[in-house]
Amino acid sequence: MADKAQIQDAIKTQGEVVRKLKTEKASKEQIDEEVAKLLKLKAQIGGDEGKHQFTLKTAKGTRDYNPKQMAIRERVFNTIIRCFKRHGAETIDTPVFELKETLTGKYGEDSKLIYDLKDQGGELLSLRYDLTVPFARYLAMNKITNIKRYHIAKVYRRDNPAMTRGRYREFYQCDFDIAGQYDPMIPDAECLKIVHEILSELELGDFRIKVNDRRILDGMFAVCGVPDDKFRTICSTVDKLDKMSWEDVKSEMVNEKGLSEEAADQIGQYVSMQGGMDLAERLLQDAKMSQSKQACAGLTDMKQLFSYLQLFQVTDKVVFDLSLARGLDYYTGVIYEAILTQNCPVNVSATQNGVDEKAEEGVSVGSVAGGGRYDGLVGMFDPKGRKVPCVGVSIGIERVFSIMEQKAEASARKVRTTETQVMVASAQKNLLNERLRLTAELWNAGIKTEVMYKKNPKLLSQLQHCEDSGIPLVAILGEQELKDGVVKLRTVHSREEVDVSRAELAEEIKKRTSDV
Amino acid sequence: MADKAQIQDAIKTQGEVVRKLKTEKASKEQIDEEVAKLLKLKAQIGGDEGKHQFTLKTAKGTRDYNPKQMAIRERVFNTIIRCFKRHGAETIDTPVFELKETLTGKYGEDSKLIYDLKDQGGELLSLRYDLTVPFARYLAMNKITNIKRYHIAKVYRRDNPAMTRGRYREFYQCDFDIAGQYDPMIPDAECLKIVHEILSELELGDFRIKVNDRRILDGMFAVCGVPDDKFRTICSTVDKLDKMSWEDVKSEMVNEKGLSEEAADQIGQYVSMQGGMDLAERLLQDAKMSQSKQACAGLTDMKQLFSYLQLFQVTDKVVFDLSLARGLDYYTGVIYEAILTQNCPVNVSATQNGVDEKAEEGVSVGSVAGGGRYDGLVGMFDPKGRKVPCVGVSIGIERVFSIMEQKAEASARKVRTTETQVMVASAQKNLLNERLRLTAELWNAGIKTEVMYKKNPKLLSQLQHCEDSGIPLVAILGEQELKDGVVKLRTVHSREEVDVSRAELAEEIKKRTSDV
């Protein structure tokens, strides 16, 4: 191997060759050839050549939101928060990390996806995995037995990100939960009503809300001959039915989890069932299912739930689906999950990339909301084990953002990222001070105002900025206007100009932008 | 040492003794004596006895926000965001963690306060320490050379928390920054105008905004005889002048950092100076200071800054203060910091706890905003070192929250945590379905509505809930009302009741709550 210094010299020389060819505008082939030689030399010397290569990126599975994305995000949040407030919810916030032990034993097989903080002395901490466990910790810690709250915040999962489909390692959850001892299924029905309202208002296309109950699942496992200690792990496998075929799910049950083939086949019959109140009634008569007290309790509540959903006029979208399992350990009663049933832009792109075969079939385009009842979770935190029954729903907002972004991309309408009403401008030189003075006047009057940070900007570039960012009005100052105590108010869209007295300017701007 | 099983048996027996005494209501002394024996036995066996003792708390230096605090937080954020939008800012968001190397070398001595994530395979990550470095990374990564943006998000510092004074390890920052190549001091002046507007609108009491310039500081260090390689560390020491006396600061400079006594004394003379444009002019004539080109550039810009601040009518609160240093490495020009100058409730309580002596003097109650110019930071991220000049300000919102919370506590006015307009209630039994039906009607009409999740709640408890949570109206259903197609609408405050036809109910509620 040649001496390192020699190679570095050769790199320098070869670099000169390439540069020279480029300035001489040599043919592409010629340049490519010499560049290839250069790269070969660089490869010889390895990664430690030259200065430290800085990695300019966000952490794996995370993303920045640019102003356009933020404008869309704000709109989506407003819709969701409006719904939560319409249902009388308060809001709380909890820290982004919790004591590690707070999260331990709450997420079953998914616990491996928790982000831990480095031990830098002091407590062992982990990033929150969802908003439900911190909520339960909050209730137990503050001895709260009744609350209806929403919480919108980011959660963290070391999952394999599929960012084209709106799946990230850092993502928002929008949670709504009702804690308290109430008559059965009333708060549960309200959660489903909320999902219905939000998905309808966001106009994401058609959707279905699948409903099931942990007690029905457990009862089903029992009557199908699943041993007690395998309920949770078999439940995790059933949960994969939205991503895997029944054959694969069955194979996992039998070959990996050691379930008998007969038990698996019996499960297979049940998990293919879908319906409404009628299905709950039928299963209550089912020779096998009716042997399980648990299943009967779940089915009776399911009937009750559907009766409330009828009053709320949302049964058109709700399906009782025995294949719905949901992986989390803490659910104890009703569980649900909402999916979009139309091929929306996001999935078209995902399909194009060959990422998601199911999307192509239009069967499942992924969950956009989910939740259920978790009556035991708060008790796990209470020193005396006091239970606080809870039911809640989480809106999977990142997927919603992706869809909205692609909709905005596809539409002709421009997304404004500021709310600026007027730009203070000038066509003449040496009026910076006057522009700043007027700008401050408008700020003080509550008008959203911009001004260029240049001593003598060109009028054209000031107008161009208004065009680019959708500012509707320009307040133009000149020597004459200053003398007359007026400002020329220009409407960007129509190019109309009118003199407005300085004293009335703020009012005039308010009037003209009140409909924006 | 006795056998572990033996001790466990003894613990069991002793536990029985204690339980028996308690059920028999024995004397306190007797019980205490036996409990002491029990504890002694338990201590013998160590920490692994019995079940795991669960720690019910949030991580050190963090806190939950309850609904009342959230209501206050929302109001504060609205004020701040309104101001940022008035100044034409867009908003962005970045992930809560960054690649560790992104944060390396940006915070000087404070770098030890960065939270690292555990190495779980893959990239090394750290929680963001501020919003400025992620902003610079964002600009470089997306090759953005012009933007005016705000960013409101939590940042993380492993500092010693002083939570009574509103200092936490997880806290919000509200940042406003202007990036771009502009004429000197115009964006800088706008940042100060923004601080002035926000602190005025929040009505936190009187405040001062101290201003200085890194170039003036560096020039001062040079002419006072500080060696070049000690600029940054001496600057960090000067930064402590708001918390330490000059004597202590001088001692640190001389004894810990090895500065000559003469140099320290000369610095001491300068850092006692405060003024406005006049001080900048005087220092430009100062025999020593005027020898430094850097200092002169800073002083000339300071004069320009004050001239713009006059146009913005904010000079009443701004002081040119040579003792202001700010510890962060990345500042290159103007720096500033806003402090509250009145004894506000927070600090009274801090003084009572003996935490902060300075608060007692009413000298400094801590910074509520700070920022400055950092023209080199984006270049540190750009592969070709392209610079993007930036200036910005960060509002220290946690302290503001603390003050607002204590103000709310002190005032008689109740903080509402929901916006519910009406409660659907009933005085009679068996009307749950009718209540739910009406509730859904109102939700669908956009009315913020609550209903009790009980089959037969007492009217009194329904009215009590309205009193407690400030719901202004109750829609009461009874057999008669249902027959007549009306609802009895009750005003909680006045107890007036009036029949409203069901078709007009939503409109009537909107009318009556439009001023809420």
Image (cartoon, coloured by chain):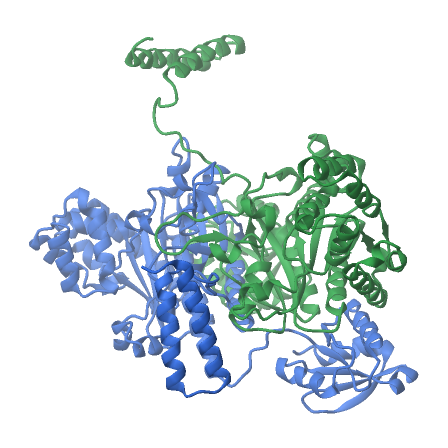
Chain colours: A green, B blue
User: Depth check: A73 or A98 in front?
Assistant: A98
Vertical placement of residue B506 versus A357, above or below: below
In percent of width and height, residue A327 lies at: 66, 49
Vertical placement of residue B420 versus A67, above or below: below
Quarter in which the C terminus of chain B is drawn = bottom right
Vertical placement of residue B417 versus A27, above or below: below
Quarter in which the N terminus of chain B is drawn = bottom left
In percent of width and height, residue A5 lies at: 28, 14
Q: Residue furthest right?
A: B483
In percent of width and height, residue B63 lies at: 46, 65
Determine the residue positioned at 32% across, 53% down.
B334
User: Along the horizontal axis of the image, is B241 left or right of A278?
Assistant: left
User: Along the horizontal axis of the image, is B78 left or right of B252?
Assistant: right
User: Depth check: B75 or B452 in front?
Assistant: B452
Residue A436 figure quarter: bottom left
In percent of width and height, residue A223 lies at: 79, 52
Determine the residue positioned at 45% across, 73% down.
B15
